[in-house]
């Protein structure tokens, strides 16, 4: 396939995703990088990722911290979260992401509210107060409101797959794991006023090129100001892996991950696109290559080390943490001390 033949409709996106020609992929990624620089600029924004707990009430079939997996569970204390956020402020990260397994009990909700207020009052010197993104799953709208009022302004909730059938195949079939509920939560987040980010996994068993094209069109239709998507990485003890379902090779999932970023940059030039950690699992240069394919956000993991290893969504024994300094050394410019909100959201188009 030739880049000049690419159209950004379902048919064109599907053909681009299915195409395995390396020269096409390289040209596509280069084009997306140029569009990124021309639209949102060359700067990369940081979100210090704090994985607050691996306790989760859900049982997604692909996830290594699902309820029924036996693993060591942890929960950071409020003090630990605050010390970590403080460190993000000292390093001028600009923003933090509070991510954790899903919980809906009152004690948890109140804890997050208290934390949000405390993080907002961290002294950041000349920088604006830390921007806060939450990634804590589906919650009742009132909870989203409470957390928004306490200071969170972005929320990540992946749709995981925009194809309801595929979504059903990778989740238990009960009301707690319903596609419609996930979609409703996304619309609730938007209505409350968050920059609501979403995303899907790439290279899932039985996922087709059409499904992936539809994921991209879903982000467009939802008008997502930010997207974080990444390759599926099988975890050895999950039902999805144990079922023996076939999924694409490491090389193919990596290539798909980069191509999806590039295509999304062409489809939605002014949004924030994250180079997901999952890319780095597949290739030590994954994060950097994501940035060179159109992504403009990275989420360096700043969870205290001993807990980080327990947040085992997938097998990440091979995690190659290229740190921020490494990216600077490679000439990538970083938007230190800035929120780096999506240009799309700010301009309201
Ligand atoms: N491979 C890739 N991503 C995964 N996630 C969970 N399990 C996996 C996996 N095996 C992602 C989901 C979820 C996020 C917290 O982690 O997309 O939204
Ligand atoms: Fe829980 Fe999220 Fe894992 Fe699902 S993907 S089991 S909601 S942590």
Image (cartoon, helix red, strand yellow):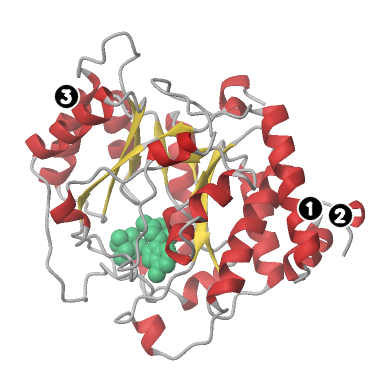
Q: Nearer the viewer, residue 273 or 219?
A: 273
Quadrant of the rendered image containing residue 237 = bottom left
Q: Quadrant where the C terminus lies?
A: top right
* Left or right: 45 as drawn, with respect to 308: right
At x 53% / y 79%, what residue is drawn? 205
* Left or right: 200 as drawn, with respect to 74: right
Residue 222, percent across and down?
61, 44
Residue 186, percent across and down?
47, 46
Q: Residue furthest front?
A: 329
Q: Which numbered marker is on residue 118?
A: 3
Q: Secondary structure at mark 3?
A: helix
Disc 3 from disc 2: Cα separation = 49 Å
Residue 223, percent across and down?
62, 39
Q: Nearer the viewer, residue 298 or 189?
A: 298
Is mark 3 in CB contact (under 8 Å) with mark 1? no
Q: Residues within 10 Å of mark 2 (few under 14, many from 20)?
A: some
Is mark 1 in CB contact (under 8 Å) with mark 2? yes
Q: Which numbered marker is on residue 27?
A: 1
Q: Is residue 222 above or below residue 19?
A: above
Q: Residue furthest top?
A: 126
At x 18% / y 35%, what residue is drawn? 84
Quadrant of the rendered image containing residue 163 = bottom right
Mark 3 lies within 8 Å of ligand 1 (Cβ measured): no
* Left or right: 161 as drawn, with respect to 70: right
User: Which tag is nearer the camera, tag 1 or tag 2?
Assistant: 1
Disc 1 from disc 2: Cα separation = 7 Å
At x 42% / y 63%, what residue is drawn? 281
Q: Quadrant of ligand 2?
A: bottom left
Q: Earlier in the sequence, mark 3 or mark 1?
A: 1
Q: Residues within 10 Å of mark 1 (few under 14, many from 20)?
A: some
Q: Which residue is mark 2?
A: 3
């Amino acid at each position: 396939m030739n880049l000049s033949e690419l159209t950004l409709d379902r048919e064109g996106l599907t053909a681009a995703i299915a195409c395995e020609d390396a020269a096409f992929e390289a040209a596509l990624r280069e084009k997306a990088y140029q569009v990124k620089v021309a639209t949102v600029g060359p700067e990369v924004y940081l979100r210090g990722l704090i994985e607050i707990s691996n306790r989760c009430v859900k049982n997604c079939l692909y996830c290594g911290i699902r309820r029924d997996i036996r693993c060591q569970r942890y929960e950071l204390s409020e003090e630990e979260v605050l010390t970590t956020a403080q460190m993000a402020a000292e390093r001028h990260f600009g923003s933090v992401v509070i991510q954790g397994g899903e919980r809906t009990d009152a004690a948890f909700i109140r804890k997050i509210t208290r934390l949000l207020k405390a993080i907002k009052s961290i002294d950041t010197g000349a920088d604006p107060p830390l921007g806060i993104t939450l990634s804590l799953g589906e919650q009742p709208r009132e909870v989203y409101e409470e957390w928004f009022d306490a200071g969170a302004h972005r929320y990540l909730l992946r749709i995981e797959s925009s194809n309801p059938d595929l979504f059903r195949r990778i989740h238990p079939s009960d009301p707690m794991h319903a596609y419609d509920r996930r979609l409703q939560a996304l619309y609730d987040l938007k209505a409350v006023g968050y920059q609501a980010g979403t995303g899907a996994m790439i290279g899932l068993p039985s996922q087709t090129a059409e499904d992936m094209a539809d994921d991209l069109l879903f982000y467009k239709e939802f008008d997502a100001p930010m997207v974080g998507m990444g390759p599926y990485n099988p975890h050895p003890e999950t039902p999805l892996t144990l079922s023996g379902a076939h999924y694409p090779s490491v090389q193919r999932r990596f290539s798909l991950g980069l191509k999806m970023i590039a295509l999304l940059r062409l489809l939605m030039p002014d949004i924030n696109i994250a180079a997901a950690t999952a890319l780095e699992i597949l290739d030590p240069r994954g994060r950097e290559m994501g940035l060179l394919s159109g992504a403009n956000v990275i989420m360096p993991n700043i969870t205290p080390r001993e807990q980080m290893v327990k947040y085992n969504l997938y097998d990440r024994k091979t995690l190659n943490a290229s740190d921020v300094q490494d990216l600077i050394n490679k000439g990538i410019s970083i938007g230190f001390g800035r929120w780096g909100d999506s240009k799309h959201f700010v301009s309201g188009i």
